[in-house]
Amino acid sequence: MNNPINKNGFPTPLSKPVVAPFSKNSRFATAGQFVTVVLIWSLTPLAAVWTVHEIHWAWGLFIRFSLATPIALACQACFKVKLPLHPQALLSYAAGALGLFASMAFCYMGASRVPSTVISIIYGSAPFVSGLVAIYIFRSEKFSAYQWLGLLLGMLGLYFAMGLNAQNLLLDRFGIGLEIVAMLLYVVSAFAVRAVAAKIHPISQMTGATIMSWLGYCCLLPFFWSEMPDKLPSFHAHIALVYSAVFSSVLAMIFYYQLLNKVNPTTLMLITIITPVLATLWGTWLNHEALSSHFILGLLLLCSGLAFYSLQIRSKY
């Protein structure tokens, strides 16, 4: 699910917070939600890579959303939330599906060409892109000196992490391009949901966007019928599919919207800073992805840039 972004480049709640089965004032519960979101999002790029290594990306996404849709509907029933079907709601679901359908399609296409660490690095730059969109398109924000410094460090981080400083580019150019398009679509989707402003409950927005995305993948399958899996995938692929459906598509977003109503934007920014670091750890440990000195330098520069970028937000809260 994609979330609208406020003028500081951070997602904002779509409506009232989700009613959770634990105390809203519990610091332990809030900390648990924060850690859970960080862990889920840091492992999501690796799940995408494991999926496309054995299953065609279109079929992998179809299976993922076929599993996620009934889970989302179960959440609707569990929290007793209705699914609005008026025109503005449908438009909001379509805007969210731009991130779940279009963005994920490009992400999974690129996942067969680049390692999970690179996917996380590229998505980690999304706050910078959303900030630039807010400045130059919506003209709703002005960067401080700290934020411009953060943007510069972040761009340098991407430059080194992608290996653009090397004479021979170490990574697949086409794969990198696909992941950048996926990240841009993710940001555009977030602004689109905000522009529609349907004021829908987060669970309803997630469910509606998930169903629309599933329908979109159903329409894609006839073009990739020859790629239909003819045997059961490996244990890794099974884990990746179930993980993406249950945790990445549903649970993480419910917890994330809880956090939006409990902690300040600076604290939420830590998710963006920590996630690429952990994703690098998981990719190296679980998928044996090689790390180079320029990639580590790029990762450090990106995280430093995100930290500076958050300083202006901190001064406002």
Image (tube, rainbow, N blue to C red):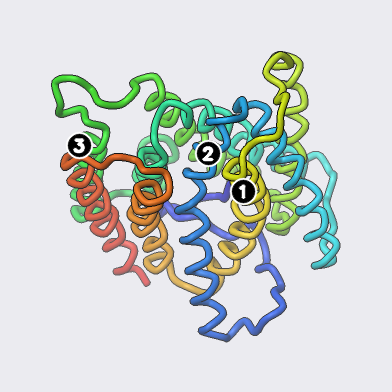
Circle 2: is it few (<14), some (14-19), or many (20+) Cα within 10 Å? Answer: many
Q: Earlier in the sequence, mark 2 or mark 3?
A: 2
Q: Which mark is residue 302?
A: none
Residue 142, horizontal then vertical, whole percent: 31, 49
Residue 133, horizontal then vertical, whole percent: 40, 38
> Mark 3 — residue?
160
The amino acid type found where label 3 is placed reads: Phe
Tell which of 265 and 275 is nearer to you: 275
Residue 296 relative to residue 104: left or right: left
Circle 3: is it few (<14), some (14-19), or many (20+) Cα within 10 Å? Answer: many
As helix, strand or loop, the secondary structure at mark 3 comes to helix
The amino acid type found where label 2 is placed reads: Trp
Tell which of 22 and 173 is nearer to you: 173
Looking at the image, do the residues carrying marks 2 and 1 touch, with CB atoms under 8 Å apart? yes
Is any atom of residue 297 visible in this view? Answer: yes
Circle 1: is it few (<14), some (14-19), or many (20+) Cα within 10 Å? Answer: some
* Residue 280 against residue 78 in the figure, above or below: above
Q: Residue at x 25, y 47 (%)?
A: 299
> Mark 1 — residue?
239
Q: Nearer the viewer, mark 2 or mark 3?
A: 2
Tell which of 15 and 46 is nearer to you: 46
Q: Earlier in the sequence, mark 3 or mark 1?
A: 3
Residue 264, horizontal then vertical, whole percent: 44, 70
> Mark 2 — residue?
50
Q: Residue at x 61, y 48 (%)?
A: 239
Q: Could you tell me how many numbered marks the image carries?
A: 3
As helix, strand or loop, the secondary structure at mark 1 comes to helix
The C terminus lies in quadrant:
bottom left
